Image (spheres, helix red, strand yellow):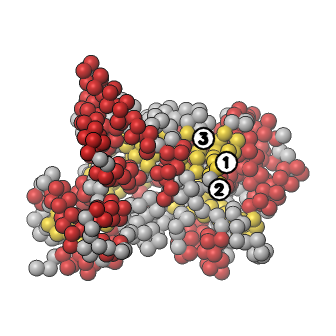
């Protein structure tokens, strides 16, 4: 088989080359798992490589040329990975699209990237394509991963994934060396990915990343701040169109030989965590906050004895974690008490939430409350923050293991320079800086100035050289008294409450701050049930006087930790959740502040009326 020849090209500085070398070495070991009908189905490295190879051959068979763009639209599943790596093998450029995108958003990205082919998940995503296909002159082929519901569907431009792989298999038989030759022709500076930013301030922008960008990022990460190793288990559940999940589902597992497990969907992540019990865990703040809220609520519902045991164990855990965070060594007495607390309470709790095997735990994509991090450290889950952006290939700073300062995102990783501009903006230089924005040289020139990537984030270094993110440059505002306010800092404190799912703070040019709060439906709903507060819907909860009093107490508690200008004087409970489909948040659940201001402007204005 051709796969036996593939390790010879492993010296090439591309991820596909490394992938085939790993597949040849690991063979029948498990590379991927996907749950189907309640059973975790295993996919070996050999199977993985064969599918990737056939995708590449199929793309060559239909005449796709190196450098051309191919879209991928769907949820996390093996076919997404086959397509992504197969596209790169053929010398083409992979363009991930968020599965939650509207038809118009899908149209924009495919039109802007001039994609000739798009791989979609199933009937729902195909419908989006068919709705906008008439305005996509470059699009020639649509490949569907899941044929369910489409058995009788017929369209000359639409092919099912199984048929596409069969085409690749036939092409391999007639052109056995085509993929090897394509791989040998890849150069580190060739474009590999177009990653469209989430568009918090306007239309998505296509960030161009080369094979060199990808390989530099994964080598630097794995040899430094993310010590993944062969056999590690990861859970894939965040959007693969995002640079962070791409790193933890594709590049790091390929580079280190890890096993990737695909969550069924976002709602089943807590259950899948318990089933997989990953050794490397990556989450955005919303995930860690959700786990934190679930534990706190669960303890409130437990009997008195369990509450007492948990409280005592958590107190011991905090003391133990505090010493470690100060880079000290716990004394004999504390080690003994902690060992008892860990065995009796903390370890069983970690096992119950699926984090008992976590060796590496990371948070990124947005700032997270230090209080939430401190809680998990008390449980023995030592979450470290990493910081970066798509334009920097995904990684800029991190806490090295054993050198963590909560409230900061660590130090610049090897090969990266970070400086703070006069206006506080974080600027980055190094091998990870992207090649620019696709078809937008003007914006590229504004973003990369004399080799420095201007991130749009504002921050500062502490005395130990750790970077602290203050806010997004565009989000910082000045109140009526001339005081600079960083809303993200206040919002994170509000979100540390188990009853708050999201919060957006406003006050530009005003005498005081106000907030729009999105309640956590699960925790507030259970709280209401326990107190016999009547409600039927989410909106009912937000209109309940009792719930408002509950949230007022949470806001008051946060205000006590803030300076007077930072106090939230008034707040309103939003009558709906925030959705990416409604343009209110990004796919990684970062709030689009401008969109919220426009959509709920009347509600904000009402908070400023006497």
Q: Is residue 379 left or right of residue 444?
A: left
Q: Is residue 301 left or right of residue 440?
A: left
Mark sitting on residue 41? 1
Q: Quadrant of residue 576?
A: bottom left
Q: Decide if residue 511 is in sight here.
A: yes
**Looking at the image, is mark 1 or mark 3 earlier in the sequence?**
1
Q: Which residue is mark 3?
A: 259
Q: Residue at x 66, y 39 (%)?
A: 30
Q: Position of residue 29 (x, y in %)?
A: 69, 36
**How many marks do you count on the picture?**
3
Binning the other alpha carbons within 10 Å of mark 1 as few (below 14), some (14 to 19) or many (20 upward) gives few
Q: Which residue is mark 2?
A: 37
Report the quarter where the N terminus lies: top right
Q: Position of residue 348 (x, y in %)?
A: 40, 37
Binning the other alpha carbons within 10 Å of mark 3 as few (below 14), some (14 to 19) or many (20 upward) gives many
- 510 w.r.t. 40: above or below: below
């Amino acid at each position: 088989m051709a796969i036996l020849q593939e390790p010879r090209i492993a010296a090439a500085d591309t991820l596909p080359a490394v992938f085939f070398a790993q597949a040849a070495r690991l063979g029948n070991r498990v590379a991927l798992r996907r749950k189907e009908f309640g059973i975790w189905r295993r996919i070996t490295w050999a199977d993985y490589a064969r599918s990737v190879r056939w995708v590449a051959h199929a793309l060559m068979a239909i005449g796709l040329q190196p450098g051309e763009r191919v879209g991928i639209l769907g949820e996390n599943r093996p076919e997404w990975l086959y397509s992504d790596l197969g596209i790169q093998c053929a010398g083409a450029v992979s363009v991930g699209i968020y599965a939650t995108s509207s038809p118009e958003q899908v149209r924009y990205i495919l039109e802007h990237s001039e994609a000739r082919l798009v791989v979609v998940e199933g009937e729902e995503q195909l419908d989006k394509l068919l709705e906008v296909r008439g305005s996509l002159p470059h699009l020639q082929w649509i490949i569907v991963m899941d044929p369910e519901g489409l058995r009788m569907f017929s369209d000359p431009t639409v092919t099912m994934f199984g048929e596409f792989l069969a085409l690749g298999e036939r092409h391999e038989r007639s052109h056995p060396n085509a993929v090897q030759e394509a791989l040998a022709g890849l150069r580190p500076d060739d474009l590999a990915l177009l990653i469209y930013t989430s568009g918090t301030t306007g239309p998505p922008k296509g960030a161009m990343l080369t094979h060199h960008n990808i390989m530099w990022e994964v080598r630097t990460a794995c040899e430094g701040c993310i010590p993944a190793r062969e056999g590690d288990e990861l859970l894939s559940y965040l959007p693969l169109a995002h640079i962070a999940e791409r790193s933890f589902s594709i590049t790091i597992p390929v580079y280190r030989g890890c096993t990737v497990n695909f969550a069924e969907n976002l709602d089943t992540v807590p259950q899948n965590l318990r089933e997989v019990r990953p050794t490397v865990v990556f989450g955005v703040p919303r995930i860690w906050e959700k786990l934190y809220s679930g534990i706190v609520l669960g303890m409130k519902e437990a009997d008195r004895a369990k509450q007492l045991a948990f409280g005592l164990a958590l107190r011991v855990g905090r003391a133990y974690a505090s010493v470690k965070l100060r880079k000290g060594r716990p004394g004999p007495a504390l080690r003994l008490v902690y060992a008892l607390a860990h065995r009796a309470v903390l370890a069983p709790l970690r096992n119950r939430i699926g984090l008992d095997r976590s060796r590496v735990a990371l948070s990124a994509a947005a700032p997270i409350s230090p209080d939430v991090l401190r809680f998990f450290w008390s449980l023995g889950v030592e979450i470290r923050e990493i910081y970066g952006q798509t334009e920097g290939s995904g990684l800029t700073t991190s806490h090295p293991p054993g050198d963590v300062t909560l409230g900061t995102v660590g130090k610049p990783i090897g090969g990266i320079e970070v400086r703070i501009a006069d206006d506080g903006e974080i600027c980055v230089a190094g091998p990870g800086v992207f090649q620019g924005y696709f078809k937008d040289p003007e914006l590229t020139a504004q973003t990369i100035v004399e080799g420095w990537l201007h991130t749009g984030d504002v921050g500062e270094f502490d005395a130990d050289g750790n970077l602290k993110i203050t806010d997004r440059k565009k989000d910082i505002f000045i109140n009526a008294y001339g005081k600079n306010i960083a809303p993200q800092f206040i919002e994170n404190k509000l979100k540390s409450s188990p009853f708050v799912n999201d919060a957006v703070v406003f006050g530009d040019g005003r005498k005081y701050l106000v907030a729009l709060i999105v309640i956590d439906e699960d925790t507030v709903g259970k709280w209401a049930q326990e107190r016999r507060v009547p409600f039927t819907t989410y909106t009912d909860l937000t209109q309940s006087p009792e719930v408002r009093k509950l949230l007022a107490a949470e806001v008051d508690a946060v205000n006590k930790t803030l300076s007077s200008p930072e106090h939230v004087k008034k707040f309103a409970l939003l009558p709906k959740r925030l959705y990416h489909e409604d343009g209110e948040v990004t796919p990684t659940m970062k709030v689009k502040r401008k969109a919220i201001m426009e959509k709920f402007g009347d509600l904000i204005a009402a908070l400023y009326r006497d």
